[in-house]
Image (cartoon, helix red, strand yellow):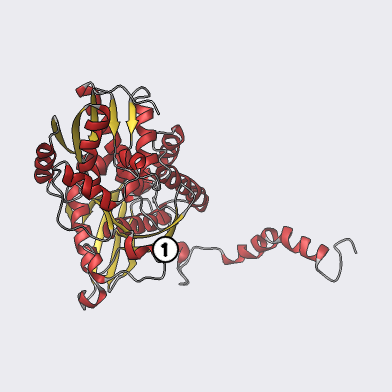
Amino acid sequence: MELLALTKVILAYSGGLDTSVAIKWLEEKYDATVVTVTVDVGQQEDLKAIAQRAEKIGVERHYSVDAKEEFVKEYIHPAIKANGLYEGKYPLSTALARPLIASKLVEIAHKENADAIAHGCTGKGNDQVRFDITIKALDPDIKIIAPVREWNLSREEEIQYAKERGVPIEAEKSIFSIDQNLWGRSIESGPLEQPDFEPPEDVFEWVRPLSQTPDEPAYIELKFENGVPVSMDGFEMDSVAMISALNEKAGLHGVGVIDHVEDRLVGIKSREVYECPAAVCLIEAHKDLEKMVLTRHQLAFKELVDREWAWLVYAGLWVDPLRKNLDAFIDSTQRAVDGSVRLKLYKGGLRVVGRNAKKSLYAIKLATYDRASTFRQKAAEGFIELWGLPSTTAYNMFEGKKGVSE
């Protein structure tokens, strides 16, 4: 393969072994200078130490970008409104962050007048798709390099490569592959590749083992306006602080572990384990509030829209026009989603125990079984006759003892 003629490469830098080795690999293979970028989406890492590591390896410049607030408002909030769950389980935590990180890489590439953008994704995962498609959409002319996908080195070979070139590496590394941001923490690889292997308790950082959770339940009240959470337990707070606080409180009570077999884009099934306390709580509360204010027809159609929205995000198609089309429909339904939901958390269990809405379609005068009910029970007889007419007619024609013509 003919080598690209490059002078400067922007590298998405995590500070780990793969991207640290990639700095030297890019310099050697392309004779290019490297500028590293770390985008803070709430991964709770020492960004100063990451920057120092990049500079020690010899990059021309390092950028640390605080994108937490943008992540919440432009990515997480739409996900809440869309009840974003891939295959009904995964709250899209990693998937949501990738197009945001990619957009920051493109911004800095333009600022630095760079020829290419590089990332540390492998050829087996979903993230390569999310990065590549978003970057190509935002700048079709910029070149994309995925060193890990190209070199196919084993971990031992990477370590040897790093030692030979004086690349500082961490003394120890977890046997699991970890990725985290404000919306969730993913854990995979190692023993978890065996689908019947129970994750050990020490693999979890956000969610407490059930044996260590409080013996008394906790209640959380979440308030929404236009489908977006605005307060918790009566306290208004900025979006980043609210999600962080909810992660802590729900995780304390053992809520938020997701363990399932997931269908990856590349055609393989993968065992995935996630910790998503805030995401699980907010999506469950939001879905419940929608039931109070949307009609049966809206709810049924929105389920289809929500499923397609989650698929587009998971599949790396954040930039596809359909996603914005779906957002427009979803936003039109959220004007009525104003109200509060009360959750009960206990020993890993999460349950909605109360809700109220400003524009509730629940009318107690109709719903009550009290004699004061305004529901006209006598009208039900005619309703049943007409509602069941197609079904009873067909049954008698094909299954009954007599055809309707007899």
Drawn side of residue 232 relative to residue 196, left or right: left
Q: Is residue 232 visible?
A: yes
Of residue 272 and residue 243, the one placed in the foreground of this image is: 272
Say whether residue 317 is left or right of residue 51. right
Residue denoted by label 1? 364
Tell me if I can see residue 227 in this picture. Answer: no
Q: Quadrant of residue 399?
A: bottom right
Q: How busy is the neighbourhood of tag 1: few (under 14 within 10 Å), some, or many (20 plus)?
A: few
Q: List the single residue furthest toward the right.
A: 406
Which type of secondary structure does the marked residue at label 1 adopt? helix
Q: Position of residue 221 (x, y in %)?
A: 25, 61
Count every numbered label the image shows and give the total: 1
In the rendered image, which quarter contains the N terminus?
Answer: top left
Seen in the picture, residue 323 relative to 175 is either above or below; the reply is above
Residue at (36%, 50%) from the top-left corner?
92
Q: Nearer the viewer, residue 236 or 71?
A: 71
Residue at the location (26% across, 69% down)? 254
Please determine whether, in this image, residue 346 is positioned above or below residue 362.
Answer: below
Res 370 → quadrant: bottom left
Task: Return the x and y of residue 379 as percentages of the image width and height.
Answer: 61, 62
Q: Amino acid at mark 1?
A: Ile
Picture coordinates of residue 337 (x, y %)?
Answer: 36, 49
Front-most of residues 329 and 393: 329
Residue 51: x and y in percent read 12, 40
Q: Quadrant of the C terminus?
A: bottom right
| Front one among 267 and 97 | 267
- Residue under the point 25% across and 65% down: 203
